[in-house]
């Protein structure tokens, strides 16, 4: 199993450009998440998807959109990139343990917006 | 509301012990612990539930004090491989959303 994969690994954008970050998991998990991590800080939730066909906002959703394409794939789109969106983006999926979920993270996408 | 982790950083020698704390001002349903090495993804270590259930890494132990809304991660006989930044993620209610602390940087020296 590859686990959670993300593409691209690195990206440089100019202000105002758009791009889509891709995420896929092969663990048959229902829930998937997008986080951003800024230097010296913890992870902040952007959006999550509890199941195929559903998405919900997290703590910092402004400037982002998501699509849960199918059970495996969950993409994050920046419509008009801003320097404040320079960050490392992590996708995660989670498996159910009892009534709770434990999350497993992908390797991350490092994004620089100039 | 973001949980507070302490200490912010700790340096150990191989074989020494460390305790990392995570506190919240709000009632918690569960606490999750992750370790992240530089330039890598966070890796799941443990989950602790209100009521005492837990699941996690064989060589790492943790506690969850429901009255104080505090969790502690115990790293005993530390190894070089324990170096990294440790994050706690707290969960309130049934939303299944985690709020992460800002991390504790652990460095283990030979």
Image (tube, coloured by chain):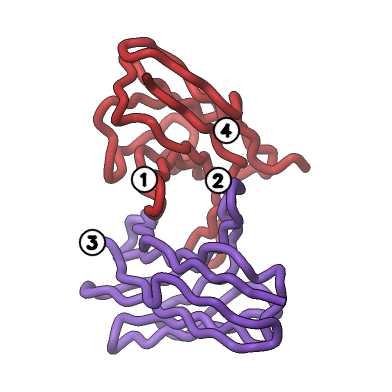
Chain colours: A red, B purple
The one nearer the camera, A54 or B104, is B104
Do callouts 2 and 3 point to residues on the same chain?
A: no
Image position, residue B75 (x, y; %): 60, 82
| Crowding near the residue tagged with mark 3, few <14, some 14–19, many ≥20 C-alpha atoms within 10 Å | few
Mark 1 vs 4, N-terminal side: 1
Q: Comparing marks 1 and 4, which lies closer to the viewer?
A: 1
Q: Residue at x 60, y 42 (%)?
A: A106
Q: Which residue is mark 4?
A: A71
Label 2 and label 3: CA atoms lie apart by 22 Å
Label 1 and label 4: CA atoms lie apart by 19 Å
- The numbered mark 3 sits on a residue in which chain? B
Q: Secondary structure at mark 3?
A: loop
Q: Residue at x 33, y 56 (%)?
A: B95
Do callouts 3 and 4 point to residues on the same chain?
A: no
Residue B5 relative to residue B58: left or right: left
Q: Secondary structure at mark 4?
A: loop
Mark 1 vs 2, N-terminal side: 1
Q: Secondary structure at mark 2?
A: strand
Quarter of the figure with the C terminus of chain A? top left
- The numbered mark 2 sits on a residue in which chain? A
Q: Is label 1 in contact with label 4 (beta carbons under 8 Å)?
A: no
Mark 4 vs 2, N-terminal side: 4
Quarter of the figure with the N terminus of chain A? top right
- The numbered mark 4 sits on a residue in which chain? A
Q: Which residue is mark 2?
A: A93
Q: Is label 1 in contact with label 2 (beta carbons under 8 Å)?
A: no
Q: Which residue is mark 1?
A: A45
Q: Is label 3 in contact with label 1 (beta carbons under 8 Å)?
A: no
Q: Comparing marks 2 and 3, which lies closer to the viewer?
A: 3
């Amino acid at each position: 199993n590859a686990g959670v994969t993300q593409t691209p690994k690195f990206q440089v954008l100019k202000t105002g450009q758009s791009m889509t970050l891709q995420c896929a998991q092969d663990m048959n998990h229902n829930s998937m998440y997008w986080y951003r991590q800024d230097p010296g800080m913890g992870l902040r939730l952007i959006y999550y998807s509890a199941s195929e066909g559903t998405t919900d906002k997290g703590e910092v959703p402004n400037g982002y959109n998501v699509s849960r394409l199918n059970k495996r794939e969950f993409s994050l789109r920046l419509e008009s990139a801003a320097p404040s969106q320079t960050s490392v983006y992590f996708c995660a999926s989670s498996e159910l343990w009892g009534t709770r979920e434990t999350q497993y993270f992908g390797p991350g996408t490092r994004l620089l917006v100039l | 509301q973001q949980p507070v982790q302490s200490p912010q950083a700790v340096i150990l020698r191989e074989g020494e012990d460390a305790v990392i704390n995570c506190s919240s001002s709000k009632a918690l349903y569960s606490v999750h612990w992750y370790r992240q090495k530089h330039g890598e993804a966070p890796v799941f270590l443990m989950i602790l539930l209100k009521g005492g259930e837990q699941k996690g890494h064989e060589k790492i132990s943790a506690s969850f004090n429901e009255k104080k809304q505090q969790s502690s991660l115990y790293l005993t006989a530390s190894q070089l491989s324990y170096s990294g930044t440790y994050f706690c993620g707290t969960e309130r209610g049934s939303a299944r959303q985690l709020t992460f602390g800002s991390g504790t940087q652990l460095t283990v020296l030979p």
